[in-house]
Structures are given as C-alpha cells and as structure tokens.
C-alpha cells in the first residue's frame, strides 16, 4: 500500500478496497519499524491517528468523504497542531503544546486527513540538511549516511520511505524543493500568499510559504486544493480564487515555452546532475515544448540577498522566544537579563544563533542601509528579472540543487558551502513565485531534481507540466529498495 | 531682566491617545478597561508562535479623522514597522508601529496662549501603533507580574513641532488635542486609565538664538497639570544648569510629582537600537482618495470652524467662542439655548453658559448633556433678563430654583413673585419714602457726598425686596435728591 501515490490511495478508499484504519495502522507499523533509523518523526500521534481514521471511515460511510478523507499524512513540526507538541525542531519549543491549529492543519483536518505525527526539521527551518535539528539528523532513505536535505528533511524522508502518503513542508529558500530533489519526491512551493501562514512558526515572513512533499504532481494538486485560499488570519494571504488544480492536470497545452537560465549550468553544478536535467528538458521538447535559453541577470546575487533578508526577519521573529510566556525557560535565573541570556543561550542551537546575530547586525543603526536596504533593492532587481523573463516564456526550468544528497556531517563545518545548496531555489522565494522540484534521474544511485518556476499564481501550469512529464517518465516512481 | 526672562523654552509634545475601537489594533480581543489580568489577550496579543497580526480598519479610519481635523495630509500609502526591543510586557519582542511612512503627516491646530492670543501649532505627524502590556512590580515577591490586557490596544501617537514656548502653551495644546479627539469620538481621552498621555521634549535657548538647545525627553505625563509642572521644573533645571556653565545632555527623564523634580531614567533603557524595519506580516496601508473624501464629508463641524462661525454668527469674542466650542456638547447646548431664546442676545446666553451653567455642572459632577437646567430653560431665563423682568440677582435665584427642579421659569417667577418692579410710579413712591426717612443722609448728598447714593439704592432695594429695577431706582434717586 505504502508504495502507492496519494491519488491511488484516494481511489482505493473511495472504492472501499481499503479502510483508513487499515492504511493508518499500516503506516504506523512502518514508522515503528523504520523510524528508529531514519529519525524522520519528532512526534508520532498513533492513538489520535487511529481515532481520526475511524472517524474518516465513518464519514465515508455517511457519504460525506472528500478525496482526502482518511488519507494518512504527516505535518512538518513547524505547523501548530492543537494539543500536540509543536517543537519547530528546537529545544526552545520542546515543551510547547500548541493551543491551536495552523490554517493548513485545520483545512486538511476538515477535509478528513489523518495526522500520523509531526516530522523532523532543521531548527526553526534554518538549514539545508536537517542537521540543525535539536532532535538529531534525519537519514536519507536512499543512502543512510547521506542527508535528506532540509529544512523539511523529516517530511521528505518519511514520504520517500513510505511512512506516510504525503507530508506538508515549508519553503523559505528551498526547504521543500531541495529535500524533494535529494529524496526523489515531488515538492511544491506555491506562490507567496497562496497558502496561509497562520499557525506556521515564522522564520522569514516575507519568504515563508507552506507546500507539499508528495510522490507525484497529481498528489500535490490534491493537497494544494485543500490548503490554498484566502485566510482572514493572514494579511499576506492572497484573495484570488482557487482554481481546480486536478482538472488542470489533464488539460492539454496549446504551447509551452520553457526558459532555461544559462547561468544555472555553471561550474557549481555537478556534471551528472546537469546531464539529468538536460535529459528531462528533452522529454519536454518531445512533448512539444519549446526550450529557449534565457538570462536572469541578478539571480547569482540570490544567496547573499537571502542571507541578509531572511536573518533580518528571523532575528525579529524569534524575539518572542524569551522564556516569559511559553517554551523553554532557563532554571534558577536571578534577574531579567539572565532570564533572556540563559533562556535564549540554552534554548537555541548554533545555526539559529548565527542567523539571529547576522540579522541583528544587518538591521543595526549604521548598517541598515548598506545591508538590509541594499538587499531589498537587489531583491527587486531579481523579481524584475523573473518578470521580464516571463514575458517570453511560460515556465523556467533548471536544476533544483547543485549536487545529489551529500554525506551527513560533510558541510556542517562550513556554513557557506551549506548555504550554496539553495543557490537555484532561493530566487523563487525572493520573487514570491511558485516553483516545484520533480525527480528527473539518479546520479550515483541518488535522486536529483528538475526545478520548474512559474509566474505569479501559475500553480496550474506548473502542476500540469510536472504531471505531463510524469506521464512520460518513471523517475517519480523510483523508491529506495530497502523501503519498497 | 531676570534670568528666566533672557531664556526661551522650546517644547514639542508626543501625545499617545488610545483609539476607541471595540477590539485591538491587530487582533479581535476586546479593549475594554479593567478586566482581570490577561483575560483580554488572545494568541496574537500574547505573541504565540505562528500567530499573525491583522489590521483593524476602524483604527485606520479614526487616524484619518484626526488627520483631516488637523489639516494634515493623509498618506496614500503608509507602512507598519517593527520596533525591536526586549521587555517582558512586550510579548513579541517588538512593537508594531509606523516609522518612516506614518499615516498622518504635517498639519496644524490653533491654541489660545496665556495672553489670549491665537497661535498655530504645527503637527509633524500622527502614526498608528500598538500599546504594550503592563508590568506589575509591587504585588509579587521576587517576581514581576505581567498583564497583557493592554497589549495590542490601538494608539495614535501625535507628534507636534517644537512650536510651544511655555508650560502653559503646552498645557493648552494638550487640552486642545484632548478636546479634539473626544469631539471626533475617536478616543475617550480617559487619563486615569492611561488613554491619553504624553511625552514632552523640552529644551531652552537664549532669547534670539535660532539653534535649538539640547533637549530632554520627559516620559509618560498623564495629566495636564503634570505636563505643565514637569515642563516648568525641567526648564528651570536646564536654565540653572546652563547659567552655571554646565551643559544639558540629551536623555530621557521622569517627572516625580511628589518631589516636583525630574530625574534621568536608567540609561540602560535608552541604550536600545530599535532596528526598525517594515513589518513583513502586514501589507502597506493604501488609502484611496475617495475614502478620505467620504470621511471628510462625514466629519462633524470641527471646533475651529465652529469657533469662527460662533464669532461671526453670534458676535462673540474669540475667547468666548473657543470655550463654547471646546466640546460638541457645550456648543450644542449654547446653540439650543440661543434658538429657544426670543430676545436674549447670544452674548448674554454665552455669559450664562460659561458662568452659572458650567459652575453648576462642576459642582454636581455632571456632563453638559445631563445639565439640570436645560437649554430651553436657560433661553427663557435670559429672555426675562433681557426684557427686564428679572434683575441679575433675581435671575440667579430663578436659576437655582430651576436647578432644584422647581418648575419652569414663568412658574417660578409667578410663585415667588419675583417680577422686577418697573412701574415708575411705584418706584417713585418707594424712593420718596426712603428719602423722607433719612433726611441727614439726603443733606449729605446735597452737600456733595456722592457716595451716599449707594446707601439710598441699598435702602430702596431692601424696601422693594430686591425687585425694583436698579437703573430706574438710580435715576429717580438722583433727580429727587437734588430736586
């Protein structure tokens, strides 16, 4: 069962070939069996999952099921879940039981999904390897001494290993697409604001976007249908109508022009990875797409811009973790200063502190103009590059990552090398554009991804292109043997 | 010239007024005052992980009203920013405020100076922000209590130009703004509850100097009296310091009312670098011109316009008009009384409103709308003065009777027989009687002692039980005494 896509499971449930209880129990067994090794879950909510499964089966019996009713999924531990620990991968929130559901969680709950648990992640989503988690690193199901990517590494590993049918993730600079690429999944980061951020613990508010990690584009369409749409709890949520993403998958395209940024195929890109991406472009060409080279003049500045803007926002967003109202509080403190120093000193890990310090610095008097303001200007230029490019092409394609999954510990000593992992993905966040990563090959036995970026609110076109590709290829059907 | 005379005091005020919205500026929690601690703070106010602010539109509309009433520009696009600092009663570790692009910019308001002159005070800006919670240091041993009910309450911070030149001017300006926000219905202005408080920037310079002196900021002044006293004492301190060859340092100071002195706040609290940056959780506030125009159209007649109209329409002095337009209720009362009066001139009515009516309200602790003597009564009463039925003294008696609820003006006059005696013959009879009774005094008058006239007037009034028309009494005495 676990090797099937969410779409297939949805049909099996609809035809009563399987019950949600059976499915849920099956996934819980697999979590029990495999997760000691993988470490992809921080919290497993077995009991409530079975209760939700029974409720879903009863709902189906009443004829009130949605396509997602009874589907067992997992939530990245960045989403607030009422009555369930919501740690954000940090010691700071190790004792935090959220009193409310994030909008994403609430909407999926309403559709009848079953929550199996909360997945591991880089602390406060700050990392590209899942190694900054307070709960320890996650292993890549394809190769246990490799990272699954991050920050949604737990979600990626859990779906890849068949511990859940799909999982939610968040993407601030590539945190859905990069792990999807490194584990052979379909990762979707919608347009900024397409999905509400309410209840999603903020890292960098102007970049954060919720999305999905699934086995196929069709699965992503099903989930996006449930979570997209306006939310009056989030001022930055978009009020545009939500189209029928499932229907969009099957419509033929009249013409598809795919732009390929020349500078995405430079020296930083692994040669085999590049070959896999080029091969996938040929598939698109065979499907009738026009492939044309394009230029994104400022995209090479994405990483430096990102590492000013994101830490700046993070330094402010993370100020609320002060030991006063919730979360970790250092013991035996004598005064206010000590409460702050020790709570934050002991509650946050090294990478989080690095970014808070960086962010505080770039916002400080005397540095604001040179860093924060300058970065905002360059961010504008990057957005403008994309806007101009989309005058001539419908989608932009390229590699998701420079290399396949790297070894655990390989980059932890060198933050810059770690940051460069997101060099191709960050642009879409800075411009607020929808983007996907879909599996497009294996390099040395490890999956690599093709990234597709679309214009504002072009989720339909993105999903359609990915779906058509997945009708022609089988890369997305590959699973690591040990988890078959 | 005394030392103080050769110095000029320069003051700018930052007034924080709580806007009268039902819910908070970024959440749905209630803003009602006096609830048990932390019972009116929701996830957003508590700064919970994942919670997001959503702007309360009412607060924006109120800010626009204020801006229009003070001749300010309403920014077509304004931006909320985060002011970052750590304090336990600041749940998110930052306050959402407006920094570079406030919603209300550059306008002015008129005040009366202590010399009775009209003076225009510039308003630099007014911006929206959220209030912090409250720290309670007294009630707990070894700990501080935090009450977050106030966290997220909408404030409008109104910043004046450094146009004020005395403590009295600062007080007049603060009262004027206080009147205005209440007039507009955008704040209850309750100072005990902290709904209206201010910081004062005070500096001094030698008269004639054009460069501003170094200023001190006096924090959290929550009454008109404190503002005036704090500014006075701070200006004195600076002048003394400078005359002794010292220098003023730029710092934040607190006013201690018990000791009537200002002293520096702990410097630690000032060492903050607030790291302002645009809040990415909130979109810029975009205000269409049509919205501004519809609010402008819905505004009540504003105090300044009303003052001008009162001066022209009712031939009142600027001072009278200013007092009568200081609140909507008072202006309404005055105009109603004028409408009811058939012959009393507006100036007479204005005097009564500013005199007896306000004094009675203060005595009874009532608002103008609750006045025991209604505008119709006052109109009728002043008519009786105008037609000389009542002397001033008798009118006072009738007013007191009205206040005690003893009936209408006419009924009271009839009941008590208070009509003024204006019958020439009747008065002459009284006058002749009094002169006949006091021949010695009459002789004194004839010998040139004019002061004795007062004696006779008193006697005649006494004889008439105060009802004789004083003007007629006077005239008759003069002619009969000399005749």
Image (cartoon, coloured by chain):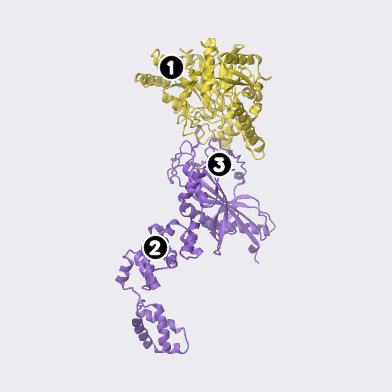
In this rendering, position of residue A482 left or right of residue A376? left
Q: Which residue is mark 3?
A: B77
* Label 3 crowd (10 A; few <14 / some 14-19 / many >=20): some
In this view, the mark in front (3 or 1): 3
- Between marks 2 and 1 in the image, the one whose residue lies nearer the viewer: 2
- The colour of chain B is purple
The numbered mark, 2 or 3, whose residue comes first in the sequence reads 3
Q: Secondary structure at mark 3?
A: strand
User: Residue beneath label 1, please?
Assistant: A10
Asked whether disc 2 touches disc 3, contact meaning CB atoms under 8 Å apart, the reply is no
Query: Quick one: label 1, few (<14), some, or many (20+) residues within 10 Å?
Result: many
Q: CA distance from mark 3 to mark 1?
A: 47 Å
- Asked if marks 3 and 1 fall on the same chain, the answer is no
Image coordinates for residue B100, horizontal then vertical, percent: 59, 43
User: Residue A253 location, x and y as percent?
Assistant: 52, 19
- In what quadrant of the picture does the C terminus of chain B appear? bottom left
Residue A151, how many percent across, how many down?
Answer: 56, 24
Quick check: can you spot residue B187? no
Q: Residues within 10 Å of mark 2 (few under 14, many from 20)?
A: some
The chain under label 3 reads B
Task: Tell me the number on the disc at residue A193.
Answer: none
Give the chain letter at badge 2: B
Name which quarter of the figure residue A206 lies in. top right
Query: Circle 2 is placed at which residue position?
Result: B339
Chain A's colour is: yellow
């Amino acid at each position: 069962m676990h090797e099937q896509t969410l779409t297939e499971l949805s049909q099996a449930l609809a035809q009563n070939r399987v019950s949600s209880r059976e499915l849920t129990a099956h996934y819980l067994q697999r979590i029990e069996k495999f997760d000691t090794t993988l470490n992809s879950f921080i919290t497993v909510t077995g009991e409530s999952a079975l209760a939700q499964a029974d409720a879903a089966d009863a709902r189906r019996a009443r004829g009130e099921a949605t396509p997602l009713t009874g589907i067992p999924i997992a939530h990245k531990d960045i989403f607030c879940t009422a009555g369930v620990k919501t740690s954000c991968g940090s010691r700071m929130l190790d004792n935090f039981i959220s009193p409310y559901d994030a909008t994403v969680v609430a909407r999926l709950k309403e559709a009848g999904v079953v929550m199996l648990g909360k997945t591991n992640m880089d602390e406060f989503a700050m990392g590209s390897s899942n190694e900054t988690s307070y709960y320890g690193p996650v292993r890549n199901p394809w190769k246990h001494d490799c990272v699954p990517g991050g920050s949604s590494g737990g979600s990626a590993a859990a779906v890849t290993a068949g511990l859940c049918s799909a999982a939610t993730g968040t993407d601030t600079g590539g945190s859905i697409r990069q792990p999807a690429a490194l584990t052979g999944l379909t990762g979707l980061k919608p347009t900024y604001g397409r999905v509400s951020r309410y209840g999603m613990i903020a890292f960098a508010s102007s970049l954060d976007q919720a999305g999905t990690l699934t086995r196929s584009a069709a699965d992503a369409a099903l989930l996006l249908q449930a979570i997209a749409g306006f939310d009056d709890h989030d001022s930055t949520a978009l009020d545009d109508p939500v189209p029928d993403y499932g229907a969009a998958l099957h419509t033929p395209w009249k013409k598809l022009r795919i732009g390929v940024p020349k500078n995405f195929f430079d020296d930083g890109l692994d040669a085999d990875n590049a070959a896999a991406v080029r091969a996938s472009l040929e598939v698109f060409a065979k499907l009738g797409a026009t492939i044309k080279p394009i230029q994104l003049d400022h995209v090479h500045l994405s990483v430096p811009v990102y590492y000013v803007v994101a830490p700046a926002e993070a330094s402010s967003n993370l100020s609320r973790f002060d030991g006063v109202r919730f979360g970790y509080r250092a013991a035996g403190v004598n005064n206010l200063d000590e409460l702050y120093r020790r709570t934050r000193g002991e509650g946050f890990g090294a990478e989080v502190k690095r970014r808070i310090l960086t962010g505080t610095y770039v916002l400080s008097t005397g540095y604001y103009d040179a860093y924060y303001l300058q970065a905002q200007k360059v961010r504008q230029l990057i957005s403008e590059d994309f806007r101009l490019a989309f005058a001539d092409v419908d989608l932009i394609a390229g590699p998701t990552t420079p290399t396949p999954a790297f070894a655990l510990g390989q980059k932890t000593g060198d933050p810059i090398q770690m940051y460069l992992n997101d060099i191709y993905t960050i642009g879409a966040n800075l411009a607020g554009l929808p983007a996907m990563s879909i599996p497009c090959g294996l390099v040395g036995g490890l999956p690599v991804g093709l990234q597709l970026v679309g214009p504002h609110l072009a989720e339909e076109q993105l999903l359609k292109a990915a779906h058509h590709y997945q009708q022609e290829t089988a890369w997305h059907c590959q699973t690591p043997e040990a988890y078959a | 010239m005394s030392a103080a005379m050769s110095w000029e005091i320069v003051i700018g005020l930052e007034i924080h007024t709580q806007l009268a919205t039902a819910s908070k500026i970024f959440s749905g929690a209630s803003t009602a005052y006096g609830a048990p601690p932390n019972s009116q703070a929701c996830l957003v106010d508590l700064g919970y992980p994942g919670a997001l602010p959503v702007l309360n539109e009412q607060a924006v509309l109120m800010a626009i009203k204020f801006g229009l009433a003070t001749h300010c520009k309403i920014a077509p696009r304004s931006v909320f920013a985060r002011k970052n600092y750590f304090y336990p009663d600041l749940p998110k570790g930052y306050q959402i405020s407006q920094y570079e692009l406030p919603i209300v910019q550059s306008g002015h308001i008129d005040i009366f100076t202590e010399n009775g002159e009209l003076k225009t005070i510039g308003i630099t800006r007014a911006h929206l922000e959220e209030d912090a919670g409250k720290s309670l240091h007294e009630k707990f041993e070894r700990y501080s209590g935090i009450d977050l009910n106030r966290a997220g309450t909408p404030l409008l911070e109104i910043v004046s130009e450094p146009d004020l030149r005395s403590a009295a001017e600062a007080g007049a300006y603060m009262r004027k703004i206080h009147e205005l926000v209440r007039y507009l219905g955008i704040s209850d202005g309750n100072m005990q509850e902290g709904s209206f408080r201010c910081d004062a920037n005070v500096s001094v310079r030698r008269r004639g100097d054009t460069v501003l002196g170094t200023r001190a900021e006096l924090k959290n002044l929550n009454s008109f009296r404190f503002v005036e006293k704090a500014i006075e004492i701070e200006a004195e301190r600076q002048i003394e310091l400078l005359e002794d060859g010292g220098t003023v340092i730029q710092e934040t100071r607190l006013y201690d009312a018990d000791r009537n002195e200002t002293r520096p706040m702990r410097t630690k609290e000032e060492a903050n670098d607030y790291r302002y940056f645009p809040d990415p959780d909130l979109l810029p506030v975009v205000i269409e011109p049509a919205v501004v125009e519809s609010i402008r159209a819905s505004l009540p007649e504003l105090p300044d316009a009303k003052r001008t109209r009162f001066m022209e329409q009712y031939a009142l002095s600027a001072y009278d008009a200013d007092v009568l337009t200081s609140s909507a209720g008072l202006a309404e009362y005055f105009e109603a009384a004028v409408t009811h009066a058939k012959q009393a001139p507006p100036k007479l009515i204005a005097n009564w409103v500013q005199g007896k009516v306000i004094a009675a309200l203060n005595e009874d602790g009532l608002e103008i709308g609750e006045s025991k003597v209604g505008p119709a009564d006052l109109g009728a009463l002043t008519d009786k003065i105008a037609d000389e039925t009542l002397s001033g003294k008798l009118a006072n008696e009738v007013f007191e009777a009205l206040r005690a609820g003893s009936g209408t003006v006419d009924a009271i006059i009839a009941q008590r027989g208070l009509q003024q005696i204006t019958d020439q013959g009747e008065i002459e009879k009284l006058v002749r009687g009094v002169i006949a009774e006091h021949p010695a005094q009459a002789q004194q008058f004839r010998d040139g002692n004019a002061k004795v006239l007062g004696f006779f007037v008193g006697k005649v009034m006494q004889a008439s039980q105060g009802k004789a028309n004083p003007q007629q009494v006077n005239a008759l005495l003069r002619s009969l005494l000399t005749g």
